[in-house]
Image (cartoon, grey):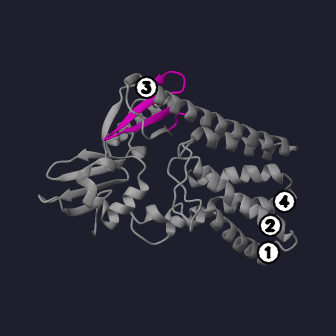
Amino acid sequence: MDTPTHGIIGRLVARAVWPGRRDNGLVNLATLCSVLPDADVFLPGGPLERLQTHRGFTHSLLGAAVLSGIVTLAARRFGMRQVPIRTTYLASLGGMLFHILFDWFTSYGTMVFEPFSNYRATSDVLFIIDPYLTLMVMVGLIIGWRRPDGAIAYRTGVAVMAAYVLMNAAVTGLGLWHVETWADRQEIKVGQTASLPVPFSPLWRRGVLVSGGRTYDLPVSAWGGVAGDPIPHQNGESDPRLERLWATRQGAIYRWFARFPVVVEDGDGKLVIQDLRFMIRADGLGWLGTLAARTALDHSPEFFNRRRFALSATFGEDGSVQRVDYDGSPLDK
């Protein structure tokens, strides 16, 4: 989830709990803590190492508990001594937990059990930028701020937000059902499946089906099922050409991060590995997603061909790894 939306979600929830102006300090504290976990983007390291640090300890349950304690002590040191320490801590912890929750709703993955496990939890419910969600939260805040009895508006805003999240969860579930139904009709053995949210299109999903050496990309409508041509990709997990790449430090990091690595031939002994989560196709985006895609194409004709979160490797004739690049930047092997 984008950081500004985290902030206004935290503020809306805090206002629903503490609607009065006398509680501004607690509301501001919860708002601050709802964006604080994203401070991990400032940690040192190259772009590949950031895959390991972003949404790591600051986004974990233990990290939230520890950071909330630090923020609570700082808040009491600088002017909130009159508020019970338990209340201050709960406001801080609540802001951070809502940040973690809404990052878990996306497909990027959040290491909620750090430092005990680097497992990346995800529920594939919301796209990382959701203008519908942002708009409804902003409306709830504005109406609550302008009305004398703002508590009703704030709490209604939280209820509407929760209903929207539940609707998206149902669409994700329908998407999985459509993918498995399609596989049964095509008599394709089902391995791993997913129903990924797509930009600006809450009623559409990108269906993913891994079957043996193939990973299928399926545009899925909540009501119509598979609504476009399936695109088969070479599954990077089962490609024997990548065994030496996965044995390198860079390859191991990328393999850990990528849920659906697929392989694209690039000539001259070079292979490009991309995570299907971050590959965009023009169909299956809904009306607003299609409009946004056309606007992006007007400004950048290569928009859909741009590689994101891509690892490329050049191999010698003996299969040895000669060069590794991540997002176009060379890496030391």
Pick whichever of labels 1 and 2 is earlier in the sequence: 1
Q: Which is in the foreground here, disc 1 or disc 2?
A: 2
Q: Can the viewer see residue 316 in this picture?
A: yes
Stretch in magenta: 197-226
Q: Dot 1 corresponds to which residue? A: 76
Label 4, residues with CA under 10 Å away: few <14, some 14-19, many ≥20: some
Pick whichever of labels 3 and 2 is earlier in the sequence: 2
> Which mark, residue 88?
2
Along the line of sight, the residue nearer the viewer: 101 or 117: 117
Along the line of sight, the residue nearer the viewer: 147 or 13: 13
Pick whichever of labels 3 and 4 is earlier in the sequence: 4
Pick whichever of labels 1 and 3 is earlier in the sequence: 1
Mark 3 residue element: helix
Q: Position of residue 23 (x, y in %)?
A: 84, 59
Q: Which is in the foreground here, disc 4 or disc 2?
A: 2
> Which mark, residue 23?
4
Residue kind at label 4, given as amino acid type: Asp
Q: Is residue 35 left or right of residue 118?
A: right
Residue kind at label 1, given as amino acid type: Arg
Residue kind at label 2, given as amino acid type: Thr
